[in-house]
Image (spheres, rainbow, N blue to C red):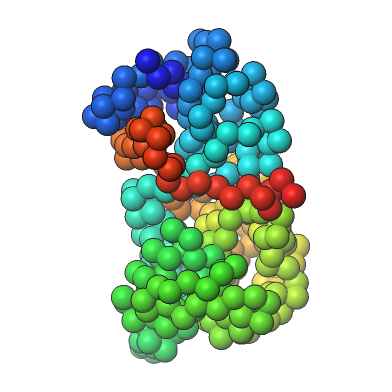
Amino acid sequence: MTLVLFAANRDKWREYEASLKNALTQEGVVAQILHLDDAPPPGSVDWIVYAPNSTLKDFTPYTALKGVLNLWAGVEGIEGNRTLTAPLTRMVDGDLTQGMVEWVTGHVLRHHLGMDAQIANPECRWDPVPPPLARDRPVAILGLGALGGACGRALSALGFPVTGWSRSEKAIPGIRSVTGEDGLAAALAAAEIVVVLVPHTRSTEGLIDAARLAQMRRGAVLLNPARGAVIDDDALLDALDRGHLAHATLDTFRTEPLPEGHRFWTHPRITVTPHIASVTRPASAACVIAANIARGERGEPLLHLVDRSEALG
């Protein structure tokens, strides 16, 4: 029998237990699933379902481990762990992707259409100036992984000219793909709305700093549903205070929950959303995890493997 260890907090266990058991049964995997607190012998564990805020940090005792399956799309909390030698997978899930597409599309349209001026109009001002059509509002997406690619396709389908920047060139219909420093500079300079969807790695820490904010168009809008650490907070505040950027809509932060009293809460050109752009939903995520475990038990390659070379150096 396959032993699966659920290494996340008890609240997550209550959310996932039934869904995981059902999904594994549907995949034909005969498994016992135990929570980390149940303390099964580490050497008997085959698979670990993991949340980055888990108390499990030392994987050395798990000598028979076949893989660790991350519950979230972000893996920065585990990918650099040198005690983990088994394969690591990230969460790539249709519902998680759809949530990100809806958040990004909604906030791009909000800024494109100038909705804030109509929603908050205390002077009852009649100002019938139409926005441009989507085809005249260039958008840049930084990061063309599963989430960035899906968001880019959705925006392109609405008519926005979309430029996507990533480490390697991607062939995605409707998206102009660029790479490298020159590609990033060109994407930032051309866009009126920039969406940050890169993962948090050593190379993306502080990616959006003062120099890159200066490369953006005056009056541009920045959306960050990726990770808070990819943006230099002080540089962003300075760009907004000076009026170089018109607005920033932020869903992720260096410290979460965002501390009371942080300038982001009250800045007139910042919108804070509480890390809700894309969340893992138990029913669909359990199916992804179970399908990967089934693949591993059949000796097939795991899906959504994380390349840890950059994190481990």
Q: Position of residue 48 (x, y in %)?
A: 50, 27
205 or 70, which is in the foreground? 70
Above-or-below relation of 77 to 182: above
Q: Farthest residue toward the front?
A: 299
Q: Position of residue 11 (x, y in %)?
A: 46, 24
Q: Position of residue 133 (x, y in %)?
A: 36, 86
Q: Position of residue 181 (x, y in %)?
A: 68, 77
Residue occupying the point 51% across, 19% down: 45
Above-or-below relation of 158 to 132: above
Q: In the figure, residue 302 lies in which quadrant?
A: top left
Q: In the figure, residue 117 lies in which quadrant?
A: bottom left
135 or 121, which is in the foreground? 135
Above-or-below relation of 302 to 150: above
Residue occupying the point 39% across, 63% down: 150
21 or 233, which is in the foreground? 21
Whether residue 113 can be seen here: no
Residue occupying the point 37% across, 15% down: 1
Whether residue 175 can be seen here: yes
How many circles with numbers are drawn on the protein?
A: 0
Left or right, residue 180 beside residue 87 = right
Above-or-below relation of 278 to 241: above
Residue occupying the point 50% across, 37% down: 70
Left or right, residue 211 beside residue 258 = right
